Structure formats: structure tokens, C-alpha cells
Image: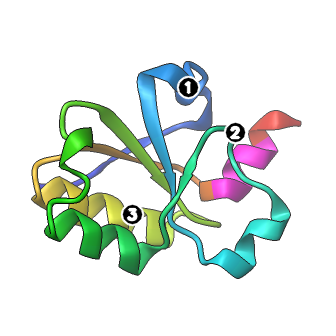
Amino acid sequence: MTSTPIRPSEIEKADEFIVIDVRESDELSDGNIENSIHLPLGSIIRNARQGKLDKYKDKKIVTYCNSGYRGNIAAEELSKLGFNVFNLEGGFQGWMKSRK
């Protein structure tokens, strides 16, 4: 299974998605996407494998990092575990550019 990329404009309806920020804590000073959940990459993979994220299996999930690379890794891992997951194209930087 592979994750599907999603453009920032496609997640405007934030209530339709669970948005997960997989950046490290020291990266959060640049801001985040409103109402996103912060779970660093290692934590999200570990929690998903332990079944701690199963409550989100019936939701659409969007993962993001700073530029898209780690968000894609998280999305791939969640996808393998049966989640309906998308990776935000361009990550947080892409999100910020779309706001200008």
C-alpha cells in the first residue's frame, strides 16, 4: 500500500480530516496547522503499531512534516496498518505557501 499525496487546498475542510504533525518538538516554533495533533514520526509509528491510534482507523488522516519527507514515511507506515491516510504535499512549508 502507498500513501496518497494531498494538496493543501484539499484539506480546507479540517473537520473532515485528522491532521497529524510528525515534526519534532523543536520544529514547532514556526507554527502548525490549526487543530493538528503533534505526534513526532517515531511516536506515531510506535503508537500505531501498538494499536493506540486505532480510534482513527475510520477517519481520513493527513500527515505532515516540514517539507513532506517524514510525513510520507508516516503515511506509508499508517497505510500498511490499514489507515486511510494522505501525505500533505510540500509539508508545512507547502501549507504556508498556500496561505500567501
- Provide the major secondary structure of the magenta segment: helix
The residue sitting at 73% across, 80% down in the picture is 26
The local secondary structure at tag 3 comes to: helix
Q: Position of residue 86 (x, y in %)?
A: 36, 44
How far is mark 2 from mark 3, CA to CA? 20 Å
How far is mark 2 from mark 1, CA to CA? 9 Å
Q: How is the image coloured?
A: rainbow
The residue sitting at 35% across, 65% down in the picture is 74
> Which residue appears farthest toward the right when viewing the image?
100
Quarter placement of the N terminus: bottom left
The residue where tag 2 is placed is 34
Residue 24 position by quadrant: bottom right
The residue where tag 3 is placed is 72
Residue range (magenta):
92-97
Quarter placement of the C terminus: top right
- Residue type highlighted by circle 2: Glu
Horizontal side, residue 95 vs residue 74: left or right = right
Q: Is residue 27 above or below residue 4?
A: below
The residue sitting at 55% across, 19% down in the picture is 13
